[in-house]
Image (cartoon, helix red, strand yellow):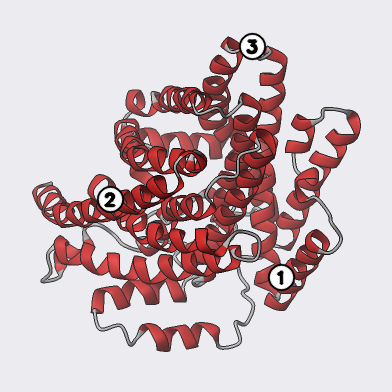
Amino acid sequence: MTAAVFRWMVLEEWRLHSDLFGGARFGAFPLAIAALTGLATWLLGVTGTGTATVAGGLVALVAFFGLQVGTIGLVGRDALRDVLGDVTLLVFSARTLPLSFRRLLATFLVKDVCYYAALVLTPVVAGYGVVAVLTGGSVASVALLWVAVVAAFAFGASLSLTLIAVASRAKAALLAVLAVGTVAVLVGNVDPVAYTPYALYAAPSPATAFQGLAPTAVLAVAGVWLFDPTTDADDGGGTRWLDGLFTTVSDPLARRSLLAVSRSSGSVSKVAFSMGVLFLVTALLLEQVTQATGIRPHSGIAFGTLLGLGTFTTYSWVTQFDDPREYLRFPVTYGRVFRSLRLAYLVLSLAAGVAYLALAALWFPTPQLAVGVLVLPGVAVYVFGVTAFVTGLSPNELLFDTPLFLAFGAALGALAVPLLVAALAVTAAPTLLTVGSVALATVAGVIGAWLTRRAGPRWDRRLRSS
């Protein structure tokens, strides 16, 4: 039965994507991923970043991707509340089929690892591997990286699901777990990276294989065992307090979006969680670059850029419950809809981004992080404008459309690459590159605002004519 459910889930995922985007267009998605990864690896090599550092960054980014996929737990309760709606995925069908939810969830995790290993992770390693081998790397090291990358995805998804499962039972327990982990790292000098799949890639041996892979297995079992989509821990009035705060927002459509996020499973904590993961990944990457090259990047430009790019997840949460066609029933234009969504998006994303920049001041120079406060808003507005223009109100679905994914990636890369290069090369001309980065982010914000204005008429025409 489990093998049959696994096959059904794979077919379900493939049919969903291929029906949305067409078999050939969706089939080209892995090729696009490989090409973009190869190009990025080559460009980073031009800036002096070694392939070993790039490999470490890939493992970290894939773990971040896994963490995002693991947030299936955050939408689980919302899906079950609408279990008889237009679409009910197999993983949420335990109420309507004679199947255990734990078995469904465990099968779903295995399916995700296998499916995304084929669709995304193998192309990522292949794109990197071509450049690495051509520049003197070995095929064996690329193969080992593939193992580490797939395991990192499983680690991220399992960690995310476990944290959500603990929080669903008792939010105090989650705070205790996080506090113990923080003390272990800061006071006990425990290296958290040593207990991730990257340890196997950095120093392959039977000991590092066990040390790096065993926590993933433990987290997967714990997440599946503890997660219960039918219960939710009492938030102690936190959601009600947020409801009171969000009802003071004068724009009714923005207020609607904010309340939808607040009242959904995970509330606004999923926004903080998504950006917090990216914050940790950025901090680790900055330390890795410093150790590998001896160059200390500009932390403010790096954090401001990457946290700004990470606001795409906030866009996804803000539009999670929007049906693109539902606004056709209301006396509003899509231009008005996108302006209101941008307000809700900025309230959530900038609050979280500035909070993490303040937290970063515990480890990184405060004057540099002040620059990040100036970079972040422009990047966030740009990301909103590009996402709204390219994907409308369906960001998660349409970004698996290969042409749109390439357009989206090119648009973000046009801003991210010069900003990150400036962060890496800031010691060459500190004042020029710092001022230039703030100016570039500001111009990007203006472009993002213009794209938001253009998105309204564009989607108004497309949705009303179809």
Q: Secondary structure at mark 1?
A: helix
Residue 394 placement (x, y as % from top left): 32, 51
Say few, some or many: other residues with alpha carbon within 10 Å of mark 2 (under 14 / 14 to 19 / 20 or more): many
Question: Crowdedness of circle 1 by 10 Å Cα count: few (<14), some, many (20+)?
Answer: some
Q: Point out residue 386 in the picture as x, y percentages from the top left corner.
A: 28, 48
Position in image of residue 236 (x %, y %): 61, 87
Q: Is residue 418 left or right of residue 448?
A: right
Can you identify the residue that label 2 sits on? Answer: 444
Q: Quadrant of residue 136?
A: top right
Q: Residues within 10 Å of mark 3 (few under 14, many from 20)?
A: few
On the rendered image, what quadrant is the N terminus found in?
A: top right
Mark 2 or 3, nearer chain start: 3
Q: Is residue 378 above or below residue 399?
A: below
Instruction: Name the residue nearer the viewer: 276 or 327.
Output: 276
Amino acid type, callout 1: Leu
CB under 8 Å between callouts 2 and 1?
Answer: no
Q: Residue at x 78, y 62 (%)?
A: 186
Q: Secondary structure at mark 3?
A: loop
Q: CA distance from mark 2 to mark 1?
A: 38 Å
| Residue 38 visible in this rendered orientation of the protein | yes
Q: CA distance from mark 2 to mark 3?
A: 38 Å
Give the residue at x 66% y 46%: 287
Q: Please, what is the three-letter code of the amino acid marked with disc 2?
A: Ala
Q: Specify which label sits upstream in the sequence, 2 or 1.
A: 1
What residue is drawn where x is 29% and y is 35%? 407
Q: Which residue is mark 3?
A: 136
Secondary structure of residue under mark 2 = helix
Answer with left or right where residue 352 lies relative to residue 339. Answer: right
Residue at the image point whose x is 41% and y is 89% from the top: 244
Circle 1 is placed at which residue position? 174
